[in-house]
């Protein structure tokens, strides 16, 4: 391996990850691509979507702008990677934040808290947290609510972090609204047959990060991986097909959608840091407003009750939520038998490469979005 790549035993991508993860002193973010500023970097190109793949009415009912108005970009050197800069209709993002905090963590969906708590204890995460979240005084240190301890939720085919597989047995109904949203986004990106079968929701507090990994456990890699960001901005690192390949940093803001498809479907990536919001404007502008009066009553983004939004607002002022949606199986495909899986697993490698401190920690709750506090 070239000496330039393995300086001090550390490859280029890992160095980049550590660079943006650093807090004191904070890193220089001037090389981070900001798609909200359009073609701001020589690496950014415009991408044509398929505007006729989703009717204007279907887009509106899903809380999205007409596809021909979406600002979609590609990155030189990353064919199949598509970045859509917030295509949501004003006010509709609040729905997704509320779903991720109040609805999607409910049973039968699975979350990190289930790994060390009983089903009855994790049955009412929202109800057990809402009142205390509303009344929290910002300065005082108080015990964390369950909502604040939430790190991931799985939907549809529930990802098994131990075996790094999906299975027919661990499956529940995929949420209809997220299914519809995903179908339209995939269709606009020329994947009309995409079926949302599995979801991993990631909950990031201000000190969280997501280690370097590839999403390869899905059995059909010809289908894209969709990723939706809400709340505080984050830095996303897109790497190469090999772990040590160099990477490209970019901001993800509230409402941004990323599509990893084709040759970019199996690239290494990571989220080294969540950006701190300016204290005078803790709420991303896209989340400040509710739905327009003329929103159709059958729009899947419904208006969020004031008392619910009070809790969501408290949470999201210091957090980021990411919804990733995956198709697991090709049409007509089934899961391999157990014996097949055993022989294959010997060389499939790890699904989520973790930071050393997290990897050493056998506690499954820390496998995702580990915070600085878990590292020495
Ligand atoms: C994932 C993932 C990135 C993000 O869930 O696999 O890479 O933006 N998420 O949080
Ligand atoms: Mn991923």
Image (cartoon, rainbow, N blue to C red):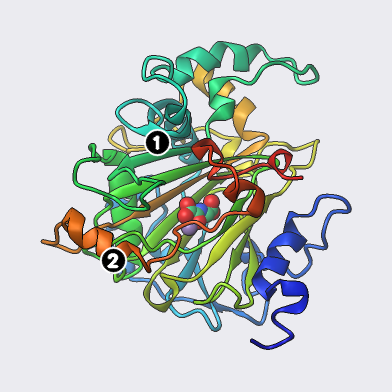
Instruction: Report x, y in % for residue 229.
Output: 52, 49
Q: Residue lying furthest right in this view? A: 25
Name above or below for residue 87 compared with residue 32. Answer: above
Whether residue 109 appears in this view of the structure is yes
Q: Is mark 1 within 8 Å of ligand 1?
A: no
Secondary structure state at the residue bearing disc 2: helix
- Indicate the quadrant containing the N terminus: top left, top right, bottom left or bottom right: bottom right
Whether residue 312 appears in this view of the structure is no
The residue that disc 2 covers is: 344
Instruction: Report x, y in % for residue 17.
Output: 68, 62
369 with respect to 278 (left or right): left
101 with respect to 55 (left or right): right
Q: Depth check: give the residue in front, 59 or 344.
A: 344
| Residue 294 numbered tag | 1
Instruction: Report x, y in % for residue 327.
Output: 28, 57
Name above or below for residue 87 compared with residue 174. Answer: below
* Sequence-first tag of 2 and 1: 1
Of tags 2 and 1, the one toward the viewer is 2
Instruction: Report x, y in % for residue 151.
Output: 53, 37
Label 2 crowd bin: few (<14), some (14–19), many (20+), radius 10 Å: few
Q: Depth check: give the residue in front, 189 or 274.
A: 274
Real-space Cα separation, disc 2 to disc 1, in angstroms: 54 Å
Q: Depth check: give the residue in front, 208 or 59.
A: 208
Q: Which quadrant of the figure has residue 206? A: top right
């Amino acid at each position: 391996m070239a000496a330039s790549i393995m300086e001090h035993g550390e490859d280029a991508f890992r160095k980049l990850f550590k660079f943006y993860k650093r807090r004191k002193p904070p890193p220089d973010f001037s090389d981070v691509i900001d798609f909200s500023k359009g073609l701001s970097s020589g690496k950014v190109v415009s991408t044509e979507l398929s505007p006729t793949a989703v009717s204007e009415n279907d887009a509106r009912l899903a809380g999205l702008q007409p596809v021909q108005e979406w600002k979609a970009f590609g990155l030189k050197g990353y064919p199949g990677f598509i970045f859509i800069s917030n295509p949501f209709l004003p006010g509709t993002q609040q729905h997704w934040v509320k779903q991720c905090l109040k609805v999607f963590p409910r049973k039968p969906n699975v979350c990190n808290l289930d790994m060390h708590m009983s089903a009855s204890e994790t049955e009412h995460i929202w109800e057990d947290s809402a009142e205390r979240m509303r009344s929290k005084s910002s300065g005082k240190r108080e015990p964390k609510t369950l909502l604040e301890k939430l790190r991931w939720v799985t939907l549809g085919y529930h990802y098994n972090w131990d075996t790094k597989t999906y299975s027919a047995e661990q499956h529940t109904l995929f949420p209809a609204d997220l299914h519809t949203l995903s179908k339209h986004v995939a269709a606009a990106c020329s994947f009309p047959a995409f079926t949302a079968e599995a979801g991993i929701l990631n909950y990031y507090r201000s000190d969280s990060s997501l280690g370097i990994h590839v999403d390869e456990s899905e059995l059909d890699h010809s289908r894209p991986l969709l990723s939706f960001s809400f709340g505080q901005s984050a830095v996303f690192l897109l790497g190469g097909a090999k772990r040590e390949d160099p990477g490209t940093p970019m901001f993800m803001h509230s409402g941004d959608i990323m599509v990893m498809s084709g040759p970019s479907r199996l690239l290494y990536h990571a989220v080294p840091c969540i950006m701190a919001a300016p204290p005078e404007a803790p709420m991303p502008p896209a989340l400040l407003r509710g739905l327009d009066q003329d929103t159709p009553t059958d729009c899947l983004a419904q208006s969020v009750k004031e008392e619910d939004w009070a809790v969501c607002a408290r949470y999201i002022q210091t957090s980021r939520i990411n919804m990733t949606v995956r198709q697991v199986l090709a049409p007509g495909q089934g899961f391999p038998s157990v014996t097949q899986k055993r022989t294959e697993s010997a060389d499939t490698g790890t699904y989520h490469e973790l930071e050393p401190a997290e990897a050493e920690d056998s506690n499954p709750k820390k496998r995702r979005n580990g915070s600085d506090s878990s590292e020495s």
